[in-house]
Image (tube, grey):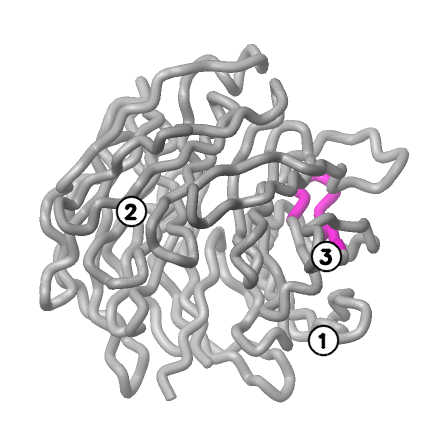
C-alpha cells in the first residue's frame, strides 16, 4: 500500500513537494520511497479511478487573493509508485484547495478557496489535463465577519452514482449541488441548487455513506458535524442532525478540517485543529444519525487532514504544525483509533491518498 502526501512548500510550508511512502500493513509504519519536486504548495491530491494518474492542486494566490492557482497531472509508475510530471493547467481561481476525479476518469474537479469558484478540467487519453471546460464563480456571504465576507469553495466531490457534484462553500454556508454533464464537460446548477447550513457553520469537507443515502459535512467555523439525507435520484439534501466535534466543556480555539467514514460505514471521524484530536462517532446505517463516541489525541498539532486505508485497518493523522504523520489502528468493534507507536516525520503534511498498485 502506497501513501501519497500533499504538502505546503512555500509561505509557512517547509516541504519539498509530494512525498510517496510505503504503508506496512502489519505494523502501520510508513517508509519513505520518493519525493516529487515541482508544483508549489501541492496541498491536496486526487488519484483517478485506475490509480494510473495523480492530480495535485497548486494552492497559490497573491497578496490580494487574485488568481494564480493550478492543477498538475502526473503519471503513476505502476511498478514503483513514482510520479512523472505530465502537465499543468490553471484552476481558474485563487487558492485551489481541493481536487477530485469523477468515476469515468474523464474530468478533474477543483475548488478554489481564495476566490470562491469551481472548475471542471478534461482529462486527456494520456492522463494530462486540458484547459477547463467549465468554470463557475460563487457569489455570496454569511455571518462570520472575517471568514465569510465572500464565497470560499472548500471541496468538490462527485456523488457515488456519478451524476452530481456537491460543493461545500465555507463562505456562503451552503452545500451546492451541480449536475455533471459529462458529454459537454459542464457543471449545471441543479433544480434545488443548494442546501443552506446554519449561519456561521462554515461547511468544509464532506463524505458519502457507502449506502449512498447520507452525506456527512464537517463545519470548520463552529466545529460541528452535520448529517444530511441525500436523495441520489433527485440530487437533494436535507439536514437531519448536527453534533459538536468537541468534548463538553472545551473552551479553547478550534477549527475542524477533514471527515472520513470507515469502509463499512459504521464509524465516522473528524479532525479538530486546536483540540488536536480525532472525533469519533458511531453511525446508524438505517437513519444515518450519529452518536459521539469520544476523542483521540493526534499526538501533534493542527491535524489538517487524515486518511483511512482502504482495508479500514489504519487511520493516519497528518499533524501539519508539528510535521508528523501518526499511525493508529482502528478497533473494529468500537471504532476507536489506537496508537501503533509509528510516527513519520513529514514536513507541512496536508493530504493523504492511498494507492494499492498490486
How many other residues sit within 10 Å of disc 2, few (<14), some (14-19) or many (≥20)? many
Residue 51 in the image, given as x and y percentages of width and height? 31, 73
Quarter occupied by the C terminus: bottom left
- Sequence-first tag of 3 and 2: 2
Q: Quadrant of residue 165?
A: top left
Residue 231 in the image: above or below residue 201: below
Residue 122 in the image, given as x and y percentages of width and height? 15, 51
How many other residues sit within 10 Å of disc 1, few (<14), some (14-19) or many (≥20)? some
Q: Closer to the camera: disc 2 or disc 1?
A: 2
Q: Which residue matches tag 1?
A: 340
Q: Nearer the viewer, residue 81 or 348?
A: 81
- SS assignment at label 3: strand
- Sequence-first tag of 2 and 1: 2
C-alpha gap between disc 3 and disc 2:
29 Å
Q: Which residue matches tag 2?
A: 109
- Sequence-first tag of 3 and 1: 3
The answer to whether residue 146 is left or right of residue 8 is: right
Q: Nearer the viewer, residue 34 or 278?
A: 278
Residue at the front extreme of this rendering: 233
Contact? badges 3 and 2 (CB < 8 Å): no
Q: Nearer the viewer, residue 11 or 118?
A: 118
Q: What is the magenta range? A: 271-281
Residue 338 in the image, given as x and y percentages of width and height? 76, 70
Residue displayed at 58% across by 15% down: 144
Camera sees residue 108: yes
Question: Any magenta on residue 348?
Answer: no
Q: Quadrant of residue 329?
A: bottom right
Amino acid at each position: 500500500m502506497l501513501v501519497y502526501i500533499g504538502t505546503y512548500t512555500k509561505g509557512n510550508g517547509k516541504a519539498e513537494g509530494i512525498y510517496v511512502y510505503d504503508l506496512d500493513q502489519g505494523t502501520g509504519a510508513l517508509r519513505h520511497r520518493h519525493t516529487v519536486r515541482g508544483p508549489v504548495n501541492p496541498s491536496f491530491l486526487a488519484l483517478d479511478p485506475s490509480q494510473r494518474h495523480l492530480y495535485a492542486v497548486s494552492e497559490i494566490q497573491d497578496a490580494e487573493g487574485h488568481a494564480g492557482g493550478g492543477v498538475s497531472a502526473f503519471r503513476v509508475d505502476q511498478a514503483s509508485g513514482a510520479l512523472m510530471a505530465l502537465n499543468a493547467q490553471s484552476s481558474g481561481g485563487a487558492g485551489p484547495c481541493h481536487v477530485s476525479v469523477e468515476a469515468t476518469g474523464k474530468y478533474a474537479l477543483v475548488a478554489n478557496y481564495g476566490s470562491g469558484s469551481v472548475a471542471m478540467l478534461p482529462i486527456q487519453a494520456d492522463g494530462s489535463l486540458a484547459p477547463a471546460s467549465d468554470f463557475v464563480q460563487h457569489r455570496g456571504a454569511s455571518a462570520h465577519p472575517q471568514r465569510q465576507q465572500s464565497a470560499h469553495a472548500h471541496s468538490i466531490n462527485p456523488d457515488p452514482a456519478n451524476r452530481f457534484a456537491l460543493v461545500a462553500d465555507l463562505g456562503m454556508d451552503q452545500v451546492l449541488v451541480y449536475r455533471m454533464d459529462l458529454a459537454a464537460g459542464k457543471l449545471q446548477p441543479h433544480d434545488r441548487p443548494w442546501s443552506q447550513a446554519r449561519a456561521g457553520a462554515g461547511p468544509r469537507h464532506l463524505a458519502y455513506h457507502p449506502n449512498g443515502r447520507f452525506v456527512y459535512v464537517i463545519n470548520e467555523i463552529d466545529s460541528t458535524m452535520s448529517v444530511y439525507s441525500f436523495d441520489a435520484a433527485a440530487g437533494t439534501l436535507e439536514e437531519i442532525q448536527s453534533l459538536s466535534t468537541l468534548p463538553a466543556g472545551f473552551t479553547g480555539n478550534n477549527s475542524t478540517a477533514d471527515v472520513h467514514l470507515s469502509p463499512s460505514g459504521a464509524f465516522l471521524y473528524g479532525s479538530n485543529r486546536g483540540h488536536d484530536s480525532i472525533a469519533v462517532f458511531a453511525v446508524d446505517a438505517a437513519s444515518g444519525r450519529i452518536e459521539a463516541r469520544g476523542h483521540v489525541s493526534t499526538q501533534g498539532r493542527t491535524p489538517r487532514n487524515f486518511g483511512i486505508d482502504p482495508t479500514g485497518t489504519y487511520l493516519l493523522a497528518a499533524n501539519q504544525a508539528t510535521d508528523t504523520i501518526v499511525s493508529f489502528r482502528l478497533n473494529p468493534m468500537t471504532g476507536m483509533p489506537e496508537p501503533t507507536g509509528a510516527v513519520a516525520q513529514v514536513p507541512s503534511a496536508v493530504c493523504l491518498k492511498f494507492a494499492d498498485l498490486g
